[in-house]
Amino acid sequence: MLPIAEGLLPYKWEWLRFDVTAGLAIAAVAIPSAVAYPAIAGLPVEVGFYASILSLVGYALLGPSRKLIVGPDAATMTVLAATLATLPLDDPAGRVAAASALAVMVGVFCILASALKLGVVASFLSRPILVGFISGISISILVGQIGRLTGVRIESDGLVMPLLEIIRKAPQIHWLTVWFGAAMFGLLVLLARLRSPIPGPLVVVVVAVLASAIFDFEGKGMKVIGSLPGGLPTLALPDVAHLPITDLVLGGAAIWLVSVSSGLVGARSFGAKDGFKVDADRELTGLGGANICSGLFSGFPVTVSDSRTAINLAASGRSQLSGLISAAALAVLLIYLNHVLRVLPHAALGAILAFAALSLIDLKGLRETWRISPMEFGFALIAMWGAISLGVLSGVVIAIAGTLLYVLLKEMRPRDALLGLVPGRPGFYKLHRMERAEPPPGMVLFMLQGSILFFNADYVRSRFESVAKEAAPGTS
């Protein structure tokens, strides 16, 4: 049965002041990503508001957690952009319809996976491979901001070709855009180092809008986002009858795997930190509701948002009412204050996305992976290379193939250990880990840390024979 409003009801009225404060804080954090993230996939700015508003409603209805907040995610948007690039789309309306259809498809996949208890699939991409893959995506996002930060139209894809193109088009660079984008990026770095209580992207949006209005950046040739629709979308099924269903399904599956994997990794991290349990199967239902609701109202795929969830926890949000209050605040902004955002320069969006991309490159996680297992570090680099060099969708395939190969290699050569006793302490200990441990007199305790399968049986037998030959004389 679906957990209707489980993250909202029953409700205690003493929670209201916390939820109102948290909801307004979430809305403040959501504005920059709602404005900037659609640009990754070439979608209109208003679509980011639609997805941010309606996904919160869908999760409040079907999501089990009182703490987690959903919204746009950079990795998901990049896979969405790669999927849209494979479809025959000629106009912005077609891109919006395709993105909405993919959101509905991701939501349906989530509901089906939840019904079949397939939440374990969310852990299919191992943590090291996911770190490498998202780092590769982040580099792709960073390269994708060259056009917004220079005012030059970049038509090539990949890592190297856009760099060569901007060198070739150097005379077309709009230097006011460059300097303003650099200033906004510097402001983000400064606010992050000062640990500003006000989110840096929100400060950049406000400063950029004020500067653009005062100095007439649009009149000086700087590109701005332009007018936004002054209302909310209506409920409608996306019209994608003219698009190839196979490409849509494959793209939807890729988006589903990446968004659910990255989203639930973040959810479990917050759960461990804040002391609440995250059930992957039940969370899939919530993410399904969020994506279906987003897609039916002209939005795009969403997942658990790290930044919005962090703000909700910091502001002591008590239930999903904080998400609904955030949705209401964003709706009011879109309906009544949308003209304020019209003069927001593209350079500010580029700075926000570039800063977000750099923050997603997990150097600490890569170093930790190298320290624990150089082999896993190698697979992380393969996943990163796939996302950068072969494109995001091919990178998903590389990441999956890398995971399968890694599992296969581990099963082909399962770890083993000799066990011994430590005087005065109960239990058994690995001899190579505990210097004081000694083998029991007259016997060998051998532990196999894996399964015996048809393709590793010979190796396991050879290990048993080797241990037996090396045993001390008199061992039974």
Image (cartoon, rainbow, N blue to C red):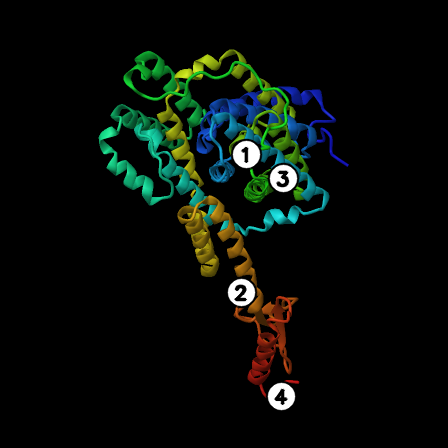
Secondary structure beneath dot 4 equals: loop
Secondary structure beneath dot 1 equals: loop
N-terminal of the pair, mark 1 or mark 3, is 3
N-terminal of the pair, mark 4 or mark 1, is 1
Marks 4/3: CA distance? 53 Å
Marks 3/2: CA distance? 35 Å
Residue at horizontal 38 percent and vertical 33 percent from the top = 193
What amino acid type is highlighted by mark number 3?
Gly
What amino acid type is highlighted by mark number 2?
Leu
- Residue toward you, 195 or 202: 202
Marks 4/1: CA distance? 62 Å
Foreground tag (3 vs 2):
2
Picture layout, residue 23 above or below residue 157? above
Residue 323, quarter of picture: top right
Labelled pair 3, 2 in contact (Cβ < 8 Å):
no
- Mark 3 lies on residue: 275
- Mark 4 lies on residue: 474
